[in-house]
Image (spheres, rainbow, N blue to C red):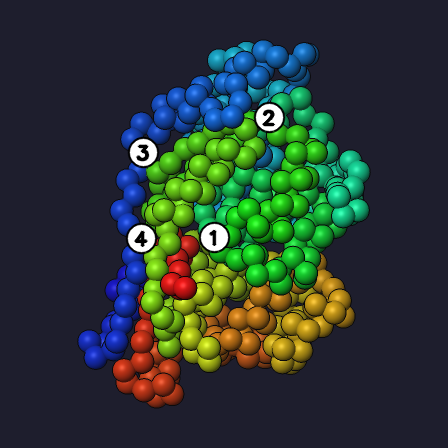
Amino acid sequence: MKFDYGKEGLEIKLDPSWNVTIFRPERQNAIKNLKKEIKKSINNPIGCPPLEEIIQNKINLETVCVVVSDATRPVPSHFILEALIEELSSYGIKDNQIMILIATGLHRISHKEELERILGNNLKNRIRVIDHIAIDENSLINIGATMDDHPILINKHYYGADLKILTGYVEPHFFMGFSGGRKSIIPGIAGAETIQNNHSAENIASPYAKFGIFKENPLHRNSIEISKKIGVDFIVNVCINEQHDIVQVATGNLEEPHEKLVNYQLKHIFKEIKEPYDIVVCGNGGYPLDLNLYQAVKSMAIGEIAVKKNGTIISVNECADGIGIGQDKFKELIFSGMQPNEIYKKILNKEIIVTDQWEIQILARILLKAEIFIVSKLNENEIGNIGMKYAETVEDAIKSCLKKYGADSSILFLPNGPQILPLLKK
């Protein structure tokens, strides 16, 4: 069986005696003549006038900021950007008026080859590109406070632009419900303090901060509030299949096209299960989402949905970047020697306050439910000492589990990351 892993994939040899269920995404065909379809959508948006009309109604429009996903996201942004910038050019907007802002959130800045992948050959030397840096105070502007009195720090290049455009892709997200739309603002181009307030321990602990939960989600609500205050003129959002081809496009105002794609995801991505499994084998869907152990926590949260209490999650992610460049606090905590319940309680009690506490908080929560085996390029001494277990291969991990649970233990394989998600029938 081929499992999405890095750029090449991973072959897993299934023993015919194993009690295996495999979930594959339903077929989603790539859009043909993609540039034409994106342009068509830009001219027929949802919830707002066409982009050309928006531009005509701007007085003295001089600068345009286009926000794009960073290198950890598999969306083929260069297709979106080519169509969008051709449209802007046809409306009289010159290349030197446009800035592309990489929505890094709290991730590292982009490598040269990653920027080339994001922009594509036709744009890589044409348009000014900068990475958002959430901890760079000089690149941020404070525009006030949220309803719960937290400061709103946002990238000043975006806030100061005359025309503000977001691009991105919509898929289930492990604590914001779904990616896309408002997520390009929070955490994409917000200051670290604003991101941390949105991703607070209290918000992450909410029962609504899970895959596929949308309007009740406190992180979503906070992000929408902030995005509306900052301003968004237009968005271009897409859905992709397991080959990372674009299968749906929606454009328009901040909320309506995003919600249209959310509804598409709810219909096509979730698959009901009648009962949880003893063993769940899951990953992030390969490169670039499985670059590091920090990002791999997302796949463990997929496993959390479907695994029995005291069952096993086998996390299959290449982790070519190791634990995660710039994730020093995450690394420090997974090597802290603390028990997961101790970590979880200390985060909720604010005894542990670190820049990326949500990842370790969710990891600790999952470890309280199930054991986790790590199958990756990491060595055994690199996966920490808070309870995660090392396995050289998926087959080795499964054999270990079968000794523990019995030969007929139920095994669920999810080879394509969040392209298909289990939903426990209530």
The residue beneath circle 1 is: 212
The residue beneath circle 2 is: 233
Q: CA distance from mark 3 to mark 2?
A: 25 Å
Foreground label between 4 and 3: 4
First of labels 3, 2 by sequence position: 3
Under circle 4, the secondary element is: loop
Label 3 packing within 10 angstroms: few (<14), some (14-19), many (20+): some
Residue at x-position 66% and y-position 46%: 222
Label 2 packing within 10 angstroms: few (<14), some (14-19), many (20+): some
Residue at x-position 59% and y-position 72%: 364
First of labels 1, 3 by sequence position: 3
First of labels 1, 4 by sequence position: 4
The residue beneath circle 4 is: 25
Foreground label between 2 and 1: 1
Under circle 2, the secondary element is: loop
Q: CA distance from mark 1 to mark 4?
A: 16 Å
Q: Quadrant of the C terminus?
A: bottom left
Label 4 packing within 10 angstroms: few (<14), some (14-19), many (20+): some
Q: CA distance from mark 2 to mark 1?
A: 26 Å
First of labels 4, 3 by sequence position: 4
User: Residue 208: image x %, image y %?
Assistant: 56, 57
The residue beneath circle 3 is: 31
First of labels 2, 1 by sequence position: 1
Residue closest to the eye, 93 or 210: 210
Q: Quadrant of the N terminus?
A: bottom left
Which amino acid type is marked by label 1? Answer: Gly
Residue at x-position 42% and y-position 42%: 263
Q: CA distance from mark 4 to mark 2?
A: 33 Å
Picture quarter containing residue 317?
bottom left
